[in-house]
Image (cartoon, rainbow, N blue to C red):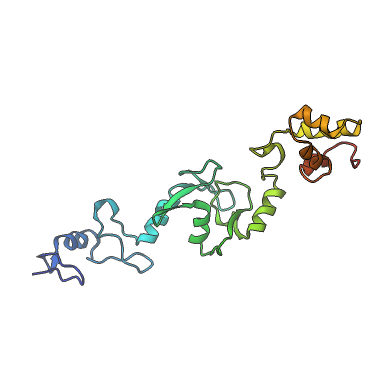
Amino acid sequence: MKCSIDGCTNKYRSIGLCSSHWKINKKYGTPTPKCHCGKPSQTFVGNKGASIFCKDHEFQKRFWENVQIKDKDSCWVWVGARTEAGYGLIYFNGALEYSHRLSLKFNGIEIPPRYHACHKCDNPLCVNPSHLYAGSPQNNANDRVERDRHAYGEKHPNSKLSNEDILNMVQLYKNGTWKIDIAKLYSVSPGHVSRILENKIRTTERKRFSDGDGI
């Protein structure tokens, strides 16, 4: 004789139930408990994964256990795994996902394809949905520039010249030093020096030059 629960092929044990459904019924008062959302609970997946919540809400419960929440207006800091750049990470449906993107998703805010989950608070570890918004790549780039978080000038990993070097190069040229001699002094190509002096690259440092005169 088989279990009376639809889809279950286990052998009958008692009150029309197999051993597994009998234990679930004893614990929860029903052999087929449901999550608060109406979906079946994860009570039939063994002791390790058993939960009164459905799969999605059990994951969300685990997600928020990795967040430090002080109050509704402050940053909600992710305390789980993170990237080298300081963004939270967690496995979701078999793949690594950014925690701040999932926070928007769990709060009913869909992120269109190729869009980013952007921070208003400039805190990469924050997952407070009120501090986040779905922004286009251009929104994200503009935000980095406005907050001075983009890798320009001496911040760029491939940069050979410091901001002070740029200002000194400008001053040398204004004092009459040839571009080729400036290039030799800083071990860069004359073309690179020309692009700097013609304001085609490293413009942020040029704007900081004290007298503001053009080249």
Residue drawn at (39%, 60%) of the image: 57
Residue 81 percent across, percent down from the top left? 46, 43
The location of residue 192, given as percent across then percent down, is 76, 39
Look at the picture and state if 165 lies above or below 61: above
12 or 174: which is nearer to us? 174
Task: Return the residue nearer the eye: 103 or 187.
Answer: 187
Tell me: 156 left or right of 41: right
Percent of width and height locating residue 172: 86, 30
Apparent side of residue 157 relative to residue 65 in the rendered image (left or right): right
Q: What count of labels does the image hold?
A: 0
| Quarter in which the N terminus is drawn | bottom left
Could one spot residue 138 in this view of the protein?
A: yes
Rendering coords of residue 25 (x, y %): 20, 63
For the C terminus, the image quarter is top right
Instruction: Give the residue at x 63% y 38%.
Output: 157
Q: In this view, does 164 lie to the left or right of 50?
A: right
Determine the residue located farthest toward the left in the rendered image.
1
Foreground of the two, 108 or 201: 201
What residue occupies the far top of the structure in this picture? 185
| Residue 168 is at least partly visible in this image | no
What residue is rendered at 66% in x and 39% in y?
156
Against 9, residue 68 (above or below) is above
